[in-house]
Amino acid sequence: MKTSNLLKTAGLSLAIALILVSCQKTNTQKPPVVTAGPSQTITLPADSAVLSGYATDSSSAIVSYLWSEITGPSAILIQDEGSKTAVALGLVPGTYVFQLMATDAAGLTGVDTMTVTMTGPGKNTNPVLLAPVHSPYDIEYIGSSTWNPYEGQYPQELGAEAWTINSNYVAVRSAFRFDLSQLSNTAIGKAQLSLYSNPTPFTGNLSTPNYGSSNQFYISRIATSWDPTQQYWSTQASIDSAGQVLIPQTNQSSQDLLNIDVTQMVKNMIANGNNGFEMRLQNEVIYNSRIFCSSSYSDSTKVPTLYITY
């Protein structure tokens, strides 16, 4: 009896085991195979890189991608990070590692990485922040073709305006210069100018630095040398329009202008002579103004600055 029961028990166990084995399914699905693309080297002044990869899957469709920064000298923005092709923005010198992850319809994922190395020309990889050469190399001059009253009357501000004085039409233009001697024979990547509105203007409507419905103005390179002690309307220097920037009309009563791209003008200054910048309204129609702080302004955080990167 004992032997018979043992055989029955063993036979039952074997049958159960066979049933369990027959019910199991072999998982043949494989995760996506991802290719993040080759390594890249980017040279300043470029500051972005195109990230382009792909994934293949033998058993399921690819449903999503995701680019991310694994390591790098700075945190950057990845545009279209959920696409096979994305753009890494705001790179600085150094080496970045980016990862591309792909997910298939079964929820399986695969990853691959690639590197982007950012370099700069020569040894000058540090940005330079320049303050303007102080008065009298930044001045405001006022007048018209029929009236030539004075210059440098209000040393704390720089303006692009058209107004009246004692019923006389006048236009206001301004000149200012930065010392670029340290940049001679240097490959400039980008030059960015910042101007700060004068909160207590001496001209215009005397209460707001911006006024009028046609106050757009040019920032241009001064092409010829000028005597800062004799800068009257009738003796003003000529202007080079190459690379000049048109600042659009604004209805804001006060508006700082940050990081204006003046790269081409600065390159022209180094190549052809540094006589500074000039500001003037595009249409010098009365009762329009844009007024900014000069290098003589009492608050040093509001003086014009020029930021150079290589």
Image (cartoon, rainbow, N blue to C red):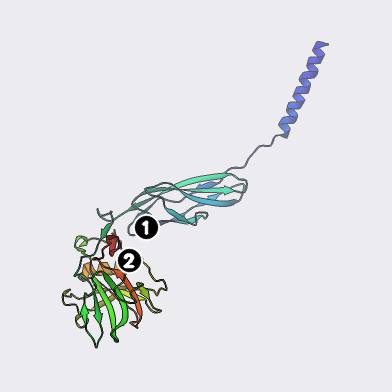
* Amino acid type of the residue tagged 2 in the rendering: Tyr
Q: Is residue 300 above or below residue 279?
A: above
Residue located beneath label 1 in the image:
47
- Residue situated furthest right in the rendering: 1
| Percent x, y of residue 237 | 21, 78
Quadrant hosting residue 16: top right
Secondary element under disc 2, as helix, strand or loop, is: loop
Q: As shown in the figure, which amino acid type bears the numbered disc 1?
A: Asp
Q: Image height check: is 309 above or below 23? A: below
Q: In the rendering, at what x and y percent does residue 46 appear?
A: 35, 59
Position in image of residue 183 (x %, y %): 22, 61
In the picture, which quadrant includes the C terminus? bottom left
Q: Nearer the viewer, mark 2 or mark 1?
A: 2
Q: Earlier in the sequence, mark 2 or mark 1?
A: 1
Res 233 → quadrant:
bottom left
Q: Is residue 40 left or right of residue 60?
A: left
Q: Is residue 29 visible?
A: yes
Indicate whether 52 appears above or below 22: below
Mark 2 lies on residue: 196
Question: Depth check: 201 or 292 in front?
Answer: 201
Left or right of 209 on screen, residue 7: right
Crowd around label 2: few <14 · some 14–19 · many ≥20 (10 Å): many
